[in-house]
Amino acid sequence: MRIISGKYKGRKLASFEGEAIRPTSDRAKEAIFSCLQFDIIGKSFYDGFCGSGAMGIEAISRGASRVVFTDIALRSCKLTKQNLSAIGESAPVINSDCISFLKSTSEKFDIIFLDPPYRSNDGIKALEIISKRDILKDGGIVILESGSQTNEVINGLILYKRKKYGISEFAFYKKADLKTCVFAGSFDPITNGHVEIVKKALEKFDKVIVALGINENKTYAFDKYLKLRMLNLAFDNMDRVEVVSFDGLLVDFLKQRSIINNVRGLRDDKDLKYEEGMYAINKQNYPELVNVYLQAEDDMKEVSSTFIKEQILLGNSVSHLLPNGVCEIVTEHFKNK
């Protein structure tokens, strides 16, 4: 066993040769750190179930600023200290089981590597504690090595990548942004009903992302740029609202932003039935997804983008149904057409 890259590249590490200890293979170790790329430099790293300390020492070699090792086996701690001494480094090596350490530590980490015994449930227990106690820093990553594919949904963590090397499966988790939600739609055009849903969402979340979905296969009354202009007008005075656009699937956009809370406005049972159907489909691609249903105000239950367009074409006023500044844009647009 050797150090793959970094400051101590090529240096050999002592291991438990011939014993029932299963170190992460060099091939798997190289692949994992390739996935992390430069994310390791200057970051804090926790090596739970450390064994010989090979993963944490690899992190040190690649520029991690702080590495903490734990293992319930005293001989593993001794071997880890021996390997650290061999390269002239020192780091905290704690003789403790990973679960107990995670339950008691006050420290947060950028990267956590878990390699529990394959037949135990300690990996899932550790993930649940990491999420519940908020041990992972913002933008942080947890990597769980196991003997089979991990499918468990862990509240507060997003399983965003899987890798398999030999008999080992590696699941990559990142911290979910639980303080932010997304309210997505075609907004063709934005109405006061949409604005009311966003205001209700702001009562539950620190930030709302209003996401304009772009579907090239659909025909809209307004183009992307005009709709973005109207959205920005509608939410110009709301500091905690961000207006963006996205192409492709909503679940891919949510994954990219590490957001699980998907706000949906409901006017009636028909809306609920449709949203539940979409939710079931989206959950297949994004198991962590949570739909947050918010009821429309009574005076907005009949209002939709289609209704707005119909009223304008009939010559009826819609100024009371659209945000300030939007009505003028919508009316002018249809007048020019």
Image (tube, grey):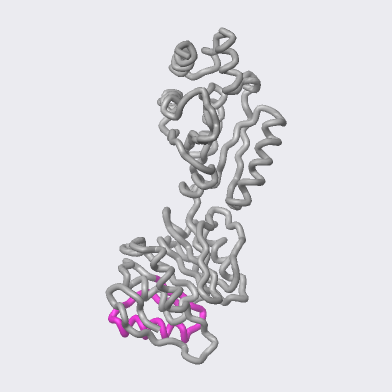
Vertical arrangement, residue 279 with respect to residue 90, above or below? above
* Residue at point 55%, 27% (across, down): 194
Q: Position of residue 215 (x, y in %)?
A: 52, 36
* In this rendering, position of residue 285 left or right of residue 4: right
Vertical arrangement, residue 216 with respect to residue 280, above or below? above
Residue 29 visible in the snapshot: yes
Front one among 43 and 311 = 311
Q: Position of residue 192 (x, y in %)?
A: 54, 21
Front one among 153 and 281 = 281
* In this rendering, position of residue 20 left or right of residue 275: left
* Residue at point 54%, 87% (across, down): 20
Front one among 239 and 6 = 6
Name the residue furthest top.
315
Q: Is residue 300 magenta?
A: no
Could you say which quadrant of the image residue 124 lies in? bottom right
* Residue at point 53%, 55% (across, down): 158
Name the residue furthest bottom.
18
Front one among 260 and 36 = 36
Q: Is residue 74 magenta?
A: yes
Numbered range of the magenta stretch:
68-95
Q: Position of residue 12 (x, y in %)?
A: 35, 85
* Residue at point 52%, 26% (across, down): 220
Vertical arrangement, residue 112 with respect to residue 69, above or below? above
Vertical arrangement, residue 299 with respect to residue 113, above or below? above
Q: Position of residue 164 (x, y in %)?
A: 52, 70
Residue 103 visible in the snapshot: no
Could you say which quadrant of the image residue 139 lies in? bottom left
Image quadrant holding the N terminus, namely bottom left
